[in-house]
Amino acid sequence: DSGVTQTPKHLITATGQRVTLRCSPRSGDLSVYWYQQSLDQGLQFLIQYYNGEERAKGNILERFSAQQFPDLHSELNLSSLELGDSALYFCASSLRGLGNTEAFFGQGTRLTVV
Amino acid sequence: AQKVTQAQTEISVVEKEDVTLDCVYETRDTTYYLFWYKQPPSGELVFLIRRNSFDEQNEISGRYSWNFQKSTSSFNFTITASQVVDSAVYFCALSSMDSNYQLIWGAGTKLIIKP
């Protein structure tokens, strides 16, 4: 158990809908990262938050947004969903940035858009 | 630009064989960090090791060992006496200032251990 909790584990929704994925980092970790894993794109970094502030942005679509709350949990909001958004979404956390610390991953949320 | 190449898409071996997973990286930075993660069939990503660019000592952890060679920009992973439970996809990753310290991932190597 990595200590990172993601909910829900599975999500099935229709095109055009909006969903929220939730992540609780390991106790004491200040950084939260969101990744998307799909068959054709592999693992893609979406966004990082550090202690409530956005730290870095990767290949995150404008239809997607995230935030980190004062208690350090994070949410990833996906809107106007398309079939191509079906993927495994991972949250990870680390003590600081990834310069010299490792990230621990949650079990992922498998999103299926139908 | 940074890049991680895992040329072996899939490897299949019989239990108890030794197996090496290759990882070659590219970066212009002199300070960087290399990682290996395991993704078993259940889907989660499990951290295995982190190595910084100034530490070229090889590391051994039980049946797992890692060979870091800066001269060839490689960070290979060997499993000795493989077991069926080692079956998973293994990812190598790199982070450095050039990537704003975000993980740059290889495509992964699917390892199949047959009983």
Image (cartoon, coloured by chain):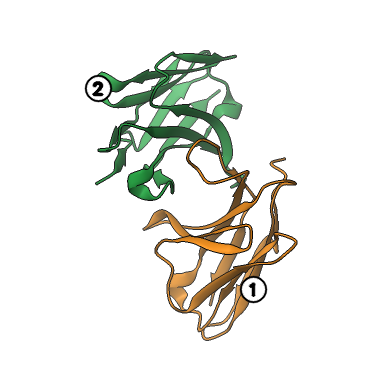
Chain colours: A orange, B green
Amino acid type of the residue that numbered disc 2 sits on in the rendered structure: Thr
- Within 10 angstroms of label 2, few (less than 14), some, or many (20 or more) residues? few
Say how many tags the image has.
2
Q: In what element is the residue under mark 2?
A: helix
The answer to whether residue A102 is seen in the rendering is: yes
State the residue position of label 1. Answer: A20
x then y, percent, for residue A111: 57, 67
Q: Which chain carries label 1?
A: A
Q: Which chain carries label 2?
A: B
**Marks 2 and 1 share the same chain:** no
x then y, percent, for residue B61: 57, 16
**Which residue occupies the foreground of this view, A13 or A102?**
A102
**In percent of the image, x 40 and y 21: which residue is there?**
B20
**In percent of the image, x 62 and y 73: which residue is there?**
A12
- Within 10 angstroms of label 1, few (less than 14), some, or many (20 or more) residues? some
Residue B72's tag is 2
Q: In what element is the residue under mark 1?
A: strand
Give residue A32's quadrant in the image: bottom right
Q: In this view, does B39 lie to the left or right of B95?
A: right
